[in-house]
Image: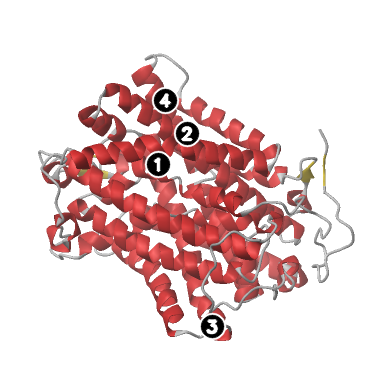
């Protein structure tokens, strides 16, 4: 095995002093379908099983209006996807969001944003997903195989090992695995939803899930809906991973925008459909008593009730497979992000090393830092005892079944906060792109929606609500502030020691002028 910086003919024009301009990620032979696979970093089946129920929390979420919250979040994230596509039609690189803001806003904005975007991604899918894999696999093993077996964290490390191996041997291999896992897991979930709706759920089909007066929070009728929007957005976080293969795509300025908008649009329909089915599947009374939100086995509950226990086991497997697909995609994004920063001299040059398979093996290892780091958090903390909610008898009980699950939800929320701050920055600076190119009213409207979506998400998550650490959204906010401080310190050190590298960041992703103006409708027809 040989790991050395891969060479390309000549140096990159305008490369930063101290950078590694010769580093490359191989052939430009990836297509739209590969970008779609990367966009599936949203992990639709995994998110439906693990995160969707949290939106129905009656205390800080949308309760019976979870479907409405998902619909609002979905429309908002489609607007965010369009906004990011404006950048993707101009710029392409391994660092994606980092390069978009570096060129679309200002190098300082791009570099600083990269600092907390990629550390946030470590919490979300570069670390937290391995907690989830361990929890899910352990639960499946105990329920369907044997009560004795490896500890949950061993399953998580096994998942981490598989992801690193597949990503080491090539992005195409990793993407094939992603598509396979996603395809296999999609059909059983959709069948379950159709069966629930066909049987009328627990109390019949109803449109009351879209009436925001059905749920109130602290006496405010719409606050419950907004309380679910942040978690609704969390369902989609990760779709921007499609942009990370821009440098390896044959036609990134067409493939990436199509993948971003197309995948998010389809996912939005899927999540609304599943949210409705699961809501009526549990029924209004059970949802109002947090029966869905706090269930440790949503798939087992619904699969067994509406089809049979054998189907519940199948659903458990597909959720694990989809979680693996998510982990693979996020590793591709994180590895290439740290690679790009290393190549530009913003991190130690070792991050720019690639394997003989043209994969950023050092950057990929950062997911191990995230995964193992969160295992340490599980062992060193007691968030299970900190996040308490009123039980049926009014006494406070843990909001989550285990400490590892509590840390997973916390880490996912931290990652969501960090990444949504970057979504907000992308949307704000997208006004400049619209003005420079299309300058159409409808584009401004879409970008305004893209700005409003994360703002509403933060509002719904943090106000109104108890402003203390017993609320995991506020605990996540404190962690996120810590990430921002860390990014600012790193950025300040770079300005003091490598100012030229910062000012010339992402020079390899200079603007591409060979694409249609941004005001033209995106063409989703196959190239050629």
* Discs 2, 4 touching: Cβ within 8 Å: no
For disc 2, the neighbor class at 10 Å (few under 14, some 14 to 19, many from 20) is: many
What mark, if any, has residue 138 been given in the picture?
4
Relative vertical location of residue 403 with respect to residue 22 in this rendering, above or below: above
Q: Which of marks 1 and 4 is nearer the N terminus?
A: 1
Q: Distance between the residues labelled 1 and 4?
A: 18 Å
* Discs 3, 1 touching: Cβ within 8 Å: no
Q: Which of marks 3 and 2 is nearer the N terminus?
A: 2
Q: Label 2: which residue?
A: 321
Horizontal arrangement in the rendering, residue 245 relative to residue 241 (left or right) = right
On the rendered image, what quadrant is the N terminus found in? top right
Q: SS class of the residue under badge 4?
A: helix
Q: SS class of the residue under badge 2?
A: helix
Q: Label 1: which residue?
A: 45
Q: Earlier in the sequence, mark 3 or mark 4?
A: 4
- The front one of 80 and 340 is 80
Q: Distance between the residues labelled 1 and 2?
A: 9 Å
Estimate the x, y position of residue 57 in percent, counting from the top left. Answer: 23, 49
Of all residues, the one furthest to the right in this rendering is: 10
Of all residues, the one furthest to the front in this rendering is: 528
Q: SS class of the residue under badge 3?
A: loop
Q: How far apart are marks 3 and 2 (CA)?
A: 42 Å
Mark 3 or mark 2, whichever is nearer to me = 3
On the rendered image, what quadrant is the C terminus found in? bottom right
Q: Label 3: which residue?
A: 438
């Amino acid at each position: 095995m040989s790991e050395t910086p891969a060479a390309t003919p000549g140096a990159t024009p305008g490369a930063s002093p101290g950078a590694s301009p010769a580093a490359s990620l191989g052939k430009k032979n990836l297509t739209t379908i590969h970008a779609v696979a990367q966009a599936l970093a949203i992990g639709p089946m995994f998110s439906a099983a693990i995160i969707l129920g949290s939106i129905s929390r009656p205390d800080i979420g949308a309760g019976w209006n979870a479907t409405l919250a998902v619909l609002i979040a979905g429309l908002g994230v489609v607007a965010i996807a369009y906004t990011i596509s404006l950048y993707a039609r101009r710029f392409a690189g391994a660092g994606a969001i980092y390069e978009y803001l570096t060129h679309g806003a200002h190098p300082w904005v791009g570099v600083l944003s990269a600092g907390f975007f990629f550390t946030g991604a470590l919490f979300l899918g570069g670390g937290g997903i391995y907690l989830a894999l361990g929890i899910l696999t352990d639960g499946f093993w105990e329920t369907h195989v044997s009560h004795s077996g490896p500890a949950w964290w061993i399953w998580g490390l096994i998942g981490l090992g598989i992801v690193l191996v597949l990503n080491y041997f090539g992005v195409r291999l990793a993407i094939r695995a992603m598509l396979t896992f996603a395809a296999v897991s999609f059909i059983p979930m959709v069948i379950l939803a159709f069966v629930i709706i066909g049987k009328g759920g627990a109390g019949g089909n109803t449109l009351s899930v879209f009436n925001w007066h059905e749920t109130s929070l602290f006496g405010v009728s719409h606050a419950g809906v907004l309380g679910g929007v942040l978690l609704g957005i969390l369902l989609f976080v990760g779709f921007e991973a499609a942009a990370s293969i821009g440098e390896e795509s044959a036609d990134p300025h067409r493939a990436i925008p199509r993948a971003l908008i197309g995948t998010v649009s389809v996912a939005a329909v899927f999540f609304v459909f599943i949210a409705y089915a699961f809501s009526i599947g549990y029924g209004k009374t059970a949802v109002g008593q947090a029966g869905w939100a706090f269930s440790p086995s949503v798939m087992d509950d619904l699969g067994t009730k509406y089809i049979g226990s054998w189907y519940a086991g199948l659903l458990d497997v597909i959720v694990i497979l989809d979680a693996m697909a998510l982990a693979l995609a996020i590793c591709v994004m994180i590895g290439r992000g740290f690679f790009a920063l290393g190549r530009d001299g913003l991190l130690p040059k070792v991050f720019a090393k690639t394997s003989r398979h043209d994969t950023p093996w050092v950057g990929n290892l950062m997911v191990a830092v995230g995964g193992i780091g969160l295992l340490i958090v599980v062992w060193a903390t007691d968030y299970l005892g900190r996040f308490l909610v009123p039980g049926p008898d009014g006494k406070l009980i843990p909001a989550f079944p285990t400490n590892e699950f509590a840390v997973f939800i916390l880490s996912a929320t931290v990652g969501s906060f960090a990444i949504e701050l970057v979504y907000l920055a992308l949307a704000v600076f997208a006004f400049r792109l619209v003005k420079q190119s299309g300058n159409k009213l409808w584009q401004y409207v879409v970008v305004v929606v893209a700005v409003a979506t994360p703002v509403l998400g933060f509002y719904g998550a943090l106000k109104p609500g108890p402003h203390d650490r017993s609320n995991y959204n506020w605990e996540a906010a404190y962690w996120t502030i810590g990430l921002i401080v860390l990014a600012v310190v790193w950025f300040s050190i770079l300005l003091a020691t490598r100012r030229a590298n910062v000012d010339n960041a992402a020079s390899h992703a200079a603007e591409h002028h060979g694409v249609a103006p941004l005001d033209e409708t995106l063409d989703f027809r196959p190239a050629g």
